[in-house]
Amino acid sequence: MIMKNFIIYTFTCLILSCAVKGPPSGGPLDLNGPYIMNIIPGDGKTNLDLDEKIEIIFNEMLDPNTIKSSIEVTPDIKLNINSFGKKIELKPKYKWPENTEFKIKINRSIADYNGNNLNSAYLLTYS
């Protein structure tokens, strides 16, 4: 019984550890950088809820190792940054500033899995 459970546990761990997030292999070389397809809520939105998340959707999967260091907020606000394939979610750790404009800069250093960077930086403004 112990040996059977050990084999099932080992097999399950092996199967679950095989999934690697990344682009599919094969096909033509990707030489183009990612670009933003949609931002929710849109740039310039006023009266943002104090804990509202901002979603930034790209045209292709991003290398998650390039994301956190590529996003700056002015004034400095602690962010929770999550990424899921083509999407980045930004949410304030505590709350967005009240009655104050703030800017989110997305630097060119965000890259796809092939090492292609954004063609240009983006500056989003909210209040």
Image (tube, rainbow, N blue to C red):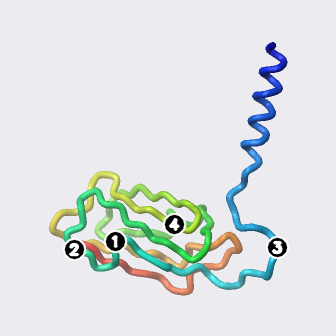
Query: Along the polypeptide, which appears first: circle 1 or circle 3?
Result: 3
Count of number-bearing discs: 4
Query: Along the polypeptide, which appears first: circle 2 or circle 3?
Result: 3
Mark 1: secondary structure: loop
User: Which amino acid, mark 2?
Assistant: Thr
Mark 3: secondary structure: loop
User: Which amino acid, mark 4?
Assistant: Lys
The residue to which callout 4 is attached is 87
The residue to which callout 3 is attached is 26
Residues 81 and 20: in front is: 20
Do callouts 2 and 3 mark residues in contact (Cβ within 8 Å)?
no
Query: Along the polypeptide, which appears first: circle 2 or circle 4?
Result: 2
User: Which amino acid, mark 1?
Assistant: Pro
Q: Which mark is residue 98?
A: none
Q: CA distance from mark 2 to mark 1?
A: 10 Å
Name the residue furthest top: 1
Residue 122 in picture, x, y percent from top left: 43, 81
The residue to which callout 1 is attached is 41
Above or below, comparing residue 123 to residue 82 in the picture: below
Determine the image quadrant of residue 123: bottom left
Q: CA distance from mark 1 to mark 4?
A: 13 Å
Mark 3, other Cα within 10 Å: few <14 / some 14–19 / many ≥20 = few
Q: Quadrant of the N terminus?
A: top right
Q: Quadrant of the C terminus?
A: bottom left
Residues 85 and 126: in front is: 85
Residue sitting at 59 percent across and 63 percent down? 85
The residue to which callout 2 is attached is 46
Name the residue furthest left: 99
Mark 2: secondary structure: loop
User: Which amino acid, mark 3?
Assistant: Gly
Q: CA distance from mark 1 to mark 3?
A: 35 Å
